[in-house]
Image (spheres, helix red, strand yellow):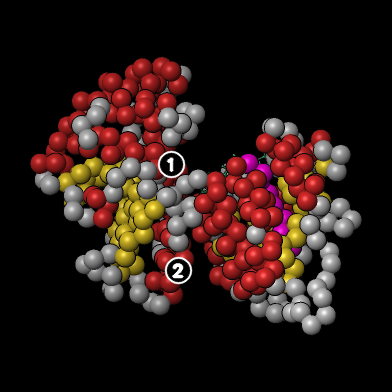
């Protein structure tokens, strides 16, 4: 891998895009692989070369050695992470105090700090990066869903921050929202289904299967988190709804998002097996909700709804012939209603999860951030 050489005389000068990557889980590793696979495409199409300044996991970091990261070193790091190893114990690795300390040491103007962690400890690092003239790309929802002030700090300079994959993974949800907002065509209402797992569950209920049976099946098929309550609680969907609300210009805190989970508080303390065993107690309640919706020509969806300044997430009866009502299976879907998209909404639908689609979305963010660089910034 060429990390250092120039181009032959007569060819356009190559632009080097340095990145600091936090997070080498499923998404971070897929991103590294895609950057390597797309090197010749990025060079030929955009004269662009992505260069790693540092790769970091929760244990530590590996900073670029003399001459940069070789292909063999990247492969070795990927293998180590796939095997569950830690970067701090790699011969080139070291521990670090905080993500902020890494940015403080290595963040330089024009670099992109990429957050592929699932951590709430990266917000200060992202804000420091922006202060230093870096750009940021996030797959991680948490920094955008803590205090409004942090969101404001990250989103303040639109050309310097991207977080396309935080809602709907590879789907262009944020880009579409930003286009509507920037034209002045204010979004009046938005609704969406942002969990493939809960979409699968709602399709099962609509097909007449019981709640307990459908949850158990999703668990068996690996569609849920190891503890299905992490999906059924709705918090991840609430984070996505909050990111949309803030993108629409609303000033909202997480506590103001009304979240209705799909299990009662009394089941929160059970073991996973105990929880699955207790689920049939909820079957009658969900059957009734599905029947009540059907009696009105509606279907039940686990929906995020943003309307009249209120943001809510939970089981919602929607018209059967609406885009959300027609949705089946694990796809994500969002409906935007604005002045120009009314009564029929602008709709985006497709696969809303998966490490490869998410990594590809982050890679697009990095490439597009380069396009938005203002020279001398
Ligand atoms: N998977 C999807 O379909 C999808 C879709 C859209 C968005 N996302 C988001 O993308 C992010 C990554 O997802 P994932 O599936 O790759 O998660 P994951 O497999 O849990 O990986 C998280 C990675 O972050 C690292 N990490 C945690 N705290 C850190 C810190 N303080 N500094 C540096 N690294 C830290 C972890 O380190 P260790 O390896 O040392 O544990 C791990 O490598 C999440 O925020 C997720 O919500 C995922």
Q: Is residue 40 visible?
A: yes
- The answer to whether 234 appears left or right of 318 in the picture is right
**Residue shown at the point (14%, 41%) measured from the top left:** 294
Q: Which residue is mark 2?
A: 178
Residue furthest bottom in the image? 10
In the foreground, 354 or 245: 354
Q: Is residue 195 above or below residue 53?
A: above
Please name which of the two marks, 2 or 1, marks the residue nearer to the observer. Answer: 2
Give me the residue at 80% from left, 61% from top.
2
The image shows residue 113 at horizontal and vertical percentages of 68, 58
Q: How many marks?
A: 2
Q: Mark 1 near ligand 1 (CB under 8 Å)?
A: no
Query: Is 66 left or right of 88, judged from the image as shown?
Result: right
Q: Which residue is mark 1?
A: 235
Q: Is residue 23 magenta?
A: yes
Vertical placement of residue 175 versus 324, above or below: below
Could you tell whether 140 is left or right of 187 in the image? right
Left or right, 36 with respect to 354, comes to right
Residue 120 in sight from this viewpoint: no
Q: Which residues are magenta?
A: 17-25
Any mark on residue 193, and which?
none
Tags 2 and 1 in contact by the CB under 8 Å rule? no
Q: CA distance from mark 2 to mark 1?
A: 24 Å
Tag 2 secondary structure: helix
């Amino acid at each position: 891998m060429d990390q250092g050489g120039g181009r032959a005389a007569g060819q356009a000068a190559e632009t080097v895009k340095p990145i600091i990557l936090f997070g080498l889980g499923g998404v971070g590793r897929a991103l590294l692989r895609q950057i390597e696979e797309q090197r010749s495409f990025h060079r030929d199409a955009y004269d662009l070369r992505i260069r790693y300044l540092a790769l970091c996991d929760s244990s530590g970091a590996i900073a670029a050695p003399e001459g940069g990261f070789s292909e063999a070193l990247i492969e070795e790091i990927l293998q180590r992470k796939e095997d569950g190893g830690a970067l701090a114990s790699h011969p080139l690795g070291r521990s670090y105090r905080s993500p902020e300390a890494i940015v403080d040491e290595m963040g330089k103007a024009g670099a992109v700090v990429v957050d592929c962690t699932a951590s709430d400890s990266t917000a200060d690092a992202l804000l420091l990066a922006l202060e230093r003239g870096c750009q940021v790309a996030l797959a991680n929802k948490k920094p955008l869903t803590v205090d409004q002030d942090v969101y404001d700090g990250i989103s303040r300079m639109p050309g310097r921050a991207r977080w396309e994959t935080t809602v709907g993974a590879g789907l262009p949800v944020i880009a579409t929202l930003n286009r509507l907002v920037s034209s002045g065509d204010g979004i009046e209402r938005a609704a969406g289904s942002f969990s493939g797992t809960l979409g699968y569950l709602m399709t099962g209920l609509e097909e007449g299967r019981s709640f307990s049976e459908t949850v158990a099946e999703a668990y068996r098929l690996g569609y849920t988190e190891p503890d299905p309550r992490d999906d059924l609680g709705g918090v991840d969907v609430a984070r996505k709804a909050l990111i949309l609300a803030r993108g629409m210009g609303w000033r909202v805190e997480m506590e103001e998002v009304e979240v209705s989970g799909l299990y009662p508080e009394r089941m929160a303390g059970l073991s996973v097996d105990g929880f699955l065993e207790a689920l049939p107690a909820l079957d009658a309640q969900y059957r009734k909700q599905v029947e009540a919706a059907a009696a009105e020509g509606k279907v039940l969806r686990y929906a995020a709804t943003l309307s009249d300044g209120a943001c809510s997430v939970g089981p919602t009866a929607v018209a059967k012939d609406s885009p959300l009502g027609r949705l089946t299976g694990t796809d994500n879907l969002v409906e935007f209603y604005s002045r120009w998209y009314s009564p029929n909404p602008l709709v985006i639908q497709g696969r809303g999860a998966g490490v490869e689609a998410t990594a590809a979305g982050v890679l697009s963010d990095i490439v597009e951030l380069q396009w938005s660089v203002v020279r001398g910034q």
